[in-house]
Image (spheres, rainbow, N blue to C red):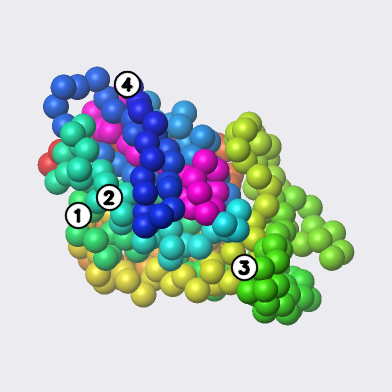
């Protein structure tokens, strides 16, 4: 395996990441890998060898506003914008000599999985997609907060918009942690905290923060509406007790996606299956992508 650092100019905003390639002299299929909310690209780099060993190149990059990529405000996560950027990344990949432009796949965790499903529905250059624990309805993220906390956050969002419009800094909140009065967090479940401690905080670029406006952008995203537009092979990997990305909503979307498709469920919660089964999931999904992209 080898890799090179890449910079992609998307209409004035530079996205940065790495393109990993297998030991081959021929152009290979490529998989674009996206992590979950708040996960920088360097947390995904160690996964690349599983894909290259399967004969696949893989592209891993930071979303705009995060990690090594450009954009302000920092730590803002806007799924629709990420999907538009992903389509530009696909265009860039199609121009690279290492890549077989007719064999492009997507692989995403959590919001990265939701992004991958939407782009698959809209961009037929994508030939196969793995969506791991995707939150297919952004509105369901509102269920993660107690009613009083949610009401307080809803009230702060318009005020934050006004501050930013007048040139002030974007308000932020913690991504993971234990909530306190007046100090809410996005995710506070025990399995999620353990996952962050073991994986994300080992990253030199990880920041335990998101902009408050990220919440508003998450609530907008309804990937389930695009289910019937997907006609490429799909593998959906779910956690059977998931409430962070409600498993019943993902199952309902899966039922609406036309064939060919496959679903696999692992026992546990959203982050729990990543802690307990990630090596198995990586091997399984890399092999599935290999089989479908080389078909």
Q: Earlier in the sequence, mark 2 or mark 3?
A: 2
Q: Which mark is residue 272?
A: none
Describe the element under mark 1 as helix, strand or loop. Answer: loop
Could you tell me if the residues under marks 2 and 1 are in contact, i.e. CB atoms within 8 Å? yes
Instruction: Say which residue appears at 58% left-offset and 72% top-offset.
Output: 216
Q: Main secondary structure of the magenta part?
A: loop
Quickly name the residue at label 3.
213
Quickly name the residue at label 2.
90
- Mark-to-mark CA distance, 1 and 3: 31 Å
Q: Callout 1 environment at 10 Å: few (<14), some (14 to 19), or many (20+)?
A: some
Quickly name the residue at label 1.
125
Q: Position of residue 285 (x, y in %)?
A: 34, 40
- Mark-to-mark CA distance, 3 and 4: 39 Å
Q: Callout 4 environment at 10 Å: few (<14), some (14 to 19), or many (20+)?
A: some
Q: Nearer the viewer, mark 2 or mark 1?
A: 2
Could you tell me if the residues under marks 2 and 3 are in contact, i.e. CB atoms within 8 Å? no
Q: Nearer the viewer, mark 3 or mark 4?
A: 3
Q: Earlier in the sequence, mark 1 or mark 3?
A: 1
Q: Position of residue 224 (x, y in %)?
A: 39, 71
Whether 70 is among the magenta residues is: yes
Could you tell me if the residues under marks 3 and 4 are in contact, i.e. CB atoms within 8 Å? no
Quickly name the residue at label 4.
1
Instruction: Say which residue appears at 70% left-offset and 62% top-offset.
Output: 169
- Mark-to-mark CA distance, 2 and 4: 21 Å
- The magenta stretch spans which residues? 51-71
Q: Earlier in the sequence, mark 2 or mark 1?
A: 2
Describe the element under mark 4 as helix, strand or loop. Answer: loop
Quadrant that contains the C terminus: top left
């Amino acid at each position: 395996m080898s890799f090179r650092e890449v910079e992609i100019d998307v209409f004035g905003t530079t996205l940065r990441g790495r393109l990993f390639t297998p030991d081959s002299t021929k152009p290979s299929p490529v998989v674009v890998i996206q992590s979950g909310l708040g996960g920088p690209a360097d947390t995904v780099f160690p996964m690349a060898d599983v894909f290259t060993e399967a004969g696949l190149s893989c592209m891993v990059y930071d979303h705009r506003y995060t990690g090594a990529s450009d954009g302000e405000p920092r730590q803002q996560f806007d799924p629709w914008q990420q999907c538009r950027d992903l389509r530009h990344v696909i265009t860039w990949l199609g121009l690279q000599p290492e890549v077989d432009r007719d064999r492009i796949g997507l692989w995403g965790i959590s919001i990265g999985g939701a992004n991958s499903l939407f782009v698959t529905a809209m961009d037929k250059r994508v030939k196969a997609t793995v969506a791991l624990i995707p939150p297919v309805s952004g509105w369901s993220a509102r269920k993660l907060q107690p009613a009083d906390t949610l009401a307080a956050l809803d009230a702060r969002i318009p005020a934050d918009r006004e501050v930013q419009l007048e040139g002030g800094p974007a308000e932020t909140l913690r991504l993971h942690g234990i909530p306190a009065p007046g100090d809410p967090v996005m995710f506070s479940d025990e399995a999620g905290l353990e996952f962050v401690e073991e994986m994300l905080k080992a990253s030199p670029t990880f920041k335990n923060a998101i902009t408050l406006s990220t919440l508003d952008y998450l609530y907008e995203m309804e990937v389930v509406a695009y289910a019937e537009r997907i006609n490429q092979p799909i593998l959906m990997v779910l956690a059977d007790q998931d409430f962070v990305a409600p498993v019943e909503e993902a199952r309902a979307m899966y039922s609406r996606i036309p064939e060919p498709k496959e679903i696999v469920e692992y026992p546990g919660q959203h982050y729990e299956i990543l802690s307990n089964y990630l090596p198995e999931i990586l091997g399984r999904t890399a092999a599935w992508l290999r089989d479908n992209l080389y078909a």
